[in-house]
Amino acid sequence: MKLRTLVEALEERYPRSLSCAWDNDGLMVCRNHDAAVRRVMLALDATRAAVEAANAASCELLLTHHPLLFRPLRAVVPDSLGGMRTMAALESGVAVLSLHTRLDAAENGVNDALVSRLMLEPCGTFGDTESPTLGRLARRPASMPDDPGEFAACIGRMLGAPHVRRTGSRPPKKIALVGGSGKDFLRAAMEAGADTFITGEIGYNDAVDYAEEGLMILEAGHYYTESPVLDTLAAFCSLYAGAECLRYDSNPSVYH
């Protein structure tokens, strides 16, 4: 299948209209729209190492969540991070497609993948003015513990996260989920009636304040709450394009 055909299919499934106005996502680098795509590398981050891994594995496309180019690129030179990554992609011939906030908001995106991985029972969406349906609402199934500590530990195991920071303590019933950085959706989660909020990270002060208001917050790590969507993307590329899909672990964090 040609690269342009696969890119068009992914952009139809995850339309640009769902991207936040401040975002920069889509096709980041492409040397040949008509190149045949046989292998796709999936990664959360479009780092230089991810580009090099894609090239080493003879992948024609690197498909990521976080954009290769997020801030304006003023020069394509090797001593700037954006320039270095762009040059690596162009020199290797690896095309880079990054689906960022549209992948958060869309059906079968980051937050649906998170609900599915945790085997929760979906019951709706929530969000803010800019992204009114980005977050997901779900209920705890009877098979999961209602003890706050045991529930947090269960979430960590299911995500493969090295730790889950819990702020607040109450039996989880109606759960709000935003993969990655969910700070901007805390108020919307409470207004949606959630008693528990699962996200990657929000920061100490907000966690303390919202826990005092009655929202139990579980922070399982940015990478671990977003990476389940890579399986969803791999399944689509495999079924739609017949491509062999590989995965690169771009998580740079080490826990001691």
Image (cartoon, grey):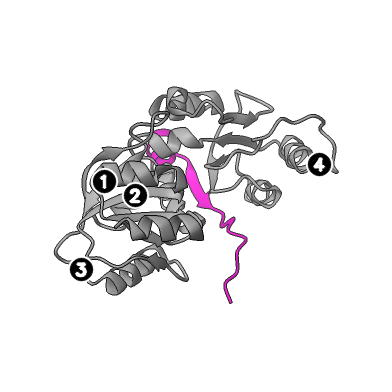
Whole-percent x, y for residue 90 in the image: 74, 34
Q: Are marks 1 and 4 in contact (CB under 8 Å)?
A: no
Kind of residue indicated by mark 3: Asp
Q: CA distance from mark 1 to mark 3?
A: 17 Å
> How far apart, in angstroms, are the residues tagged by discs 1 and 2?
6 Å
Q: Which residue is mark 4?
A: 80
Range drawn in magenta: 236-256
Front-most of residues 162 and 199: 199
Residue 91: x and y in percent read 77, 37
Give how far apart the Cα atoms at labels 3 and 4 are. 49 Å
Amino acid type shown at disc 1: Leu
Q: Give whichever of discs 4 and 2 has the lower sequence position.
A: 4
Kindly identify which residue carries mark 2.
177
Most extreme residue toward the bottom, as rendered? 256
Query: Which residue is depicted at the point 47% across and 29% down?
Result: 19
Q: Are marks 1 and 2 in contact (CB under 8 Å)?
A: yes
Determine the CA span between mark 4 and mark 2.
Answer: 35 Å
Ranked by sequence position, the earlier of labels 1 and 4 is: 4
In the rendered view, tell whether residue 106 sits above or below residue 165.
above
Q: Secondary structure at mark 1?
A: strand
Compare marks 3 and 4 and give the one earlier in the sequence: 4
What's the residue at 30%, 47% (across, down)? 190
Q: CA distance from mark 1 to mark 4?
A: 40 Å
Instruction: Nearest to the eye among marks 4 and 2: give it.
Output: 2
Residue at label 3? Answer: 146
